[in-house]
Image (spheres, rainbow, N blue to C red):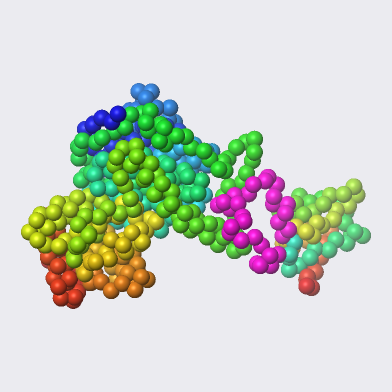
Amino acid sequence: MSEESKPGWKSIPMAGVLLEPGSAMKYKTGDWRAFRPIIDEEKCINCLLCWIYCPDGAVIREEKKVSINYEYCKGCGICANECPVKAITMVEEKR
Amino acid sequence: MSKILGLTGDGAVAYAVKQCNVDVVAAYPITPQTLIVEEFSEYVHNGEVHTEFVCVESEHSAMSACVGASLTGARVFTATASQGLALMHEILYIASSLRCPIVMGVVNRTLSAPINIHCDHSDMMGSRDCGWIQIYVENAQEAYDWVLQAFRIAEDPDVLLPVTVNLDAFILSHSLEGVKVLDDAEVEKFVSTRKPVLRVDPDKPITVGALCLTDFFFETKRQHVEAMNNSPKTISRVNNEFAELTGRRYDFIETFGMDDAEAAIICLGSTAGTAKAVAKSMRSKGKKVGVIKPWVYRPFPAKQIVEAIENLKALAVLDRACSIGAPYGPLCSDITATLYREGIKLGVFNVIYGLGGRDMTPFNIETVFNETLEVAKTGVVKEPLKFVGVRE
């Protein structure tokens, strides 16, 4: 969101209070990312270490593989670092 | 029906709090505020109040507990002084920024070093910009009266800001005075109960104190400013209702002899009492002198002060705190900024006095008045910042 499209001081709740639970879901942090993790499904052994280590819960565990939720992945690269079979590569984001 | 009780300044504060149906008091004792919490804890022990009294290990914890309690919608009070207020400093900002309508008695004592337990305003002035409404009182009666009004002002949905009621160490805190007190039922009707706007409630969860970065922090501060800007309306309304109830009329400032005064003193707290007595005696000898005493220091009563000085030629601003390295003490900085903004040309000089409890005697005040009259006559300020009562 650009600064102009955000609500002003007259229309936000008092004192920075968040009125509904779970509102962090609305804060899409994917656009913080400078490097995008790409999973090579051929190499992936589905060990789930990336799923365990991801600090943002942005690794999605599916039946026989994992994928990345790019709406929230900040591109920290921990998954790529931890992957024992080097199935994850960090590719620079081109915006 | 009102009755008169012999109360110290601290006792008057404790008595007022006892009558206000306060839910939570979290406090840590520090001279010369100790009597407030000591006397209040007796009320708790005797079952005279329903208050949850939280004994904490420091003032930092006291204010933290007050913030937590206030966020649940409770009516909250605490009291401190000097180093205690300094230790609270970071939580003072959190209390006001989270819009917790806490009322706090501050018994103004200097800050170390050297260690000293006596009066000056350096403690509150050190936390001047914490975003709280700040009241200064002249005597125990005013301390009692303003504590009752403070809960109403703080808890008003248009304001929701914490309030400090400042009283001078020992001069007020430990001096016995006849204080007119209201019946419990009258106070209960006047202060009613707190009606929280937002509160922490398990059945309707909200998040308070979440991280707020470059994109929203500035907006919350702007809201805080607006709350302070809204407060004068509420303060006036509460003053009016209090006057109807008690016959004692409060305002943003009190003036004495200002209708025809050519030279005046403006000062906070108990010194105003001495200044009025000296002014009275000087006026009986034909000297046109007056006194301005701000009761409300934040929000700064610029409008009322400008009205009061309309016919004035010279003003001595008395500061019982020293802003070392600044052009003036805190009150004088506010006054000169106000005068500049309004385009008013007035002979102003700043008197730093009474640090560490040094007495400001009637003789000292008469000397200041005479110097102010001289400025009024000549239009020349020889010494813009001077120290009165210090040995050379």
**Residue B308 falls in image quadrant:** bottom left
Q: Please tell me which residue lies in front, B351 or A90.
A: B351
Residue A93: give x, y in percent of width and height. Answer: 78, 70
| Left or right: B346, with B92 as reference point | left
Q: Residue furthest top?
A: B46
How many dots with numbers?
0
Residue sitting at 43 percent across and 27 percent down? Answer: B50
Mark yes or no: residue A39 visible: yes
| Left or right: B98, with A83 as reference point | left
Mark yes or no: residue B53 visible: no
Q: Quadrant of the N terminus of chain B?
A: top left
**A15 is within the stretch colored magenta:** yes
**B105 is within the stretch colored magenta:** no
| Left or right: B202, with B195 as reference point | right
Query: In the picture shown, does residue B149 fall above or below B96?
Result: above
Residue sitting at 34 percent across and 37 percent down? Answer: B245
Residue sitting at 27 percent across and 59 percent down? Answer: B321
Residue B254: give x, y in percent of width and height. Answer: 27, 53
Q: Please tell me which residue lies in front, B109 or B76.
A: B76
Query: In the picture shown, does residue B47 fall above or below B230?
Result: above
Residue sitting at 65 percent across and 60 percent down? Answer: A7
**In this picture, which residue range is highlighted in magenta?**
A1-29
Q: Quadrant of the C terminus of chain B?
A: bottom left
| Left or right: B230, with A55 as reference point | left
Predominant SS of the magenta segment: loop
